[in-house]
């Protein structure tokens, strides 16, 4: 676990920069749907060059569950959650993934993501390996608690699980993605975030 607290913690920023450069280089030459393929190739090359491949056994973690974009693992001491994220929700541009993770860490800094490397999941999909603190929850947050928290952050509610401010939209902020910790704090563990100007 030392990797999480070493200089590789800047991996998120380095990978985001690689993805952005690849997009800028191909923006006028290729259709948007081919950005992602080229960005993944660049990240694989980056992982190979810098020995950034991770396996769950290396982290001493065990499989917990699988969702639309993440295979989720937990540590034997229940101090971390590791997610192998296949970039499914990034659409055709991996920059969306990095925007989302950076915004998450800005707004929900009590349960930040740290990117520690890359892996292939059980479906052999290329993934970013993210870790978060393991939250001991008393229960799921209520919709009212979520709405109040988001309002305090300066967001306006659009729907029961969707909010926006001038720059970002936060959605999928539903009770099973927001935990009420035993310390009385809310933990937004798995929402979606995008720039308001983005459309899918």
Image (tube, grey):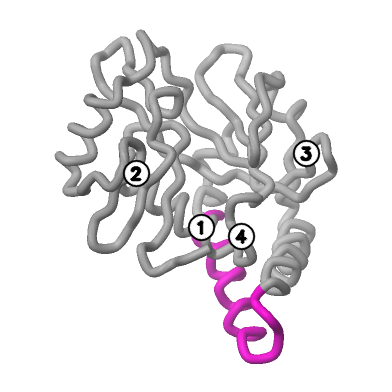
Q: Earlier in the sequence, mark 3 or mark 1?
A: 1
Give how far apart the Cα atoms at labels 3 and 2 are.
29 Å
Give how far apart the Cα atoms at labels 2 and 4 are.
19 Å
Give how far apart the Cα atoms at labels 3 and 1 are.
19 Å
The structure residue drawn at horizontal position 42% and vertical position 57%, both measured from the top left corner, is: 194
Q: Earlier in the sequence, mark 3 or mark 4?
A: 4
User: Compared with residue 134, is residue 114 higher up or lower down, i.e. above or below?
Assistant: below
Q: Which residue is mark 3?
A: 121
Q: Which residue is mark 2?
A: 162
Based on the displayed image, in which of its 4 quarters is residue 65 positioned?
Answer: top right
Pointer 3 and pointer 2: residues touching (CB < 8 Å)?
no
Q: Nearer the viewer, residue 192 or 48?
A: 192
| Residue 91 circle label | 4
- Residue 6 place in picture, x, y as percent: 53, 44
The structure residue drawn at horizontal position 37% and vertical position 21%, both measured from the top left corner, is: 179
Q: Which residue is mark 1?
A: 98
Give how far apart the Cα atoms at labels 1 and 2 are.
20 Å
Give how far apart the Cα atoms at labels 3 and 4 are.
19 Å
């Amino acid at each position: 676990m030392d990797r999480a607290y070493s200089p590789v913690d800047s991996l998120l920023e380095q990978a985001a920069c690689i993805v952005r450069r690849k997009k800028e280089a191909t923006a006028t030459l290729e259709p948007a749907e081919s950005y992602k393929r080229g960005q993944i190739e660049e990240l694989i090359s980056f992982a190979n060059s810098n020995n950034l491949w991770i396996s769950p056994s290396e982290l001493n973690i065990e499989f917990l569950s699988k969702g639309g974009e993440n295979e989720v693992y937990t540590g034997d001491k229940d101090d971390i959650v590791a997610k192998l994220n296949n970039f499914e929700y990034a659409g055709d541009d991996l920059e969306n993934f990095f925007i989302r993770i950076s915004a998450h860490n800005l707004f929900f800094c009590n349960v930040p993501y740290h990117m520690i490397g890359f892996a292939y999941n059980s479906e052999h999909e290329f993934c970013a390996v993210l870790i978060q603190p393991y939250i001991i929850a008393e229960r799921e947050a209520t919709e009212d608690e979520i709405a109040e928290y988001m309002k305090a952050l300066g967001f306006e509610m659009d729907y029961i699980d969707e909010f926006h401010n001038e720059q970002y939209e936060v959605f999928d902020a539903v009770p099973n993605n927001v935990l009420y910790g035993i310390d009385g704090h809310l933990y937004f563990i798995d929402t979606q975030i995008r720039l308001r100007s983005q459309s899918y």
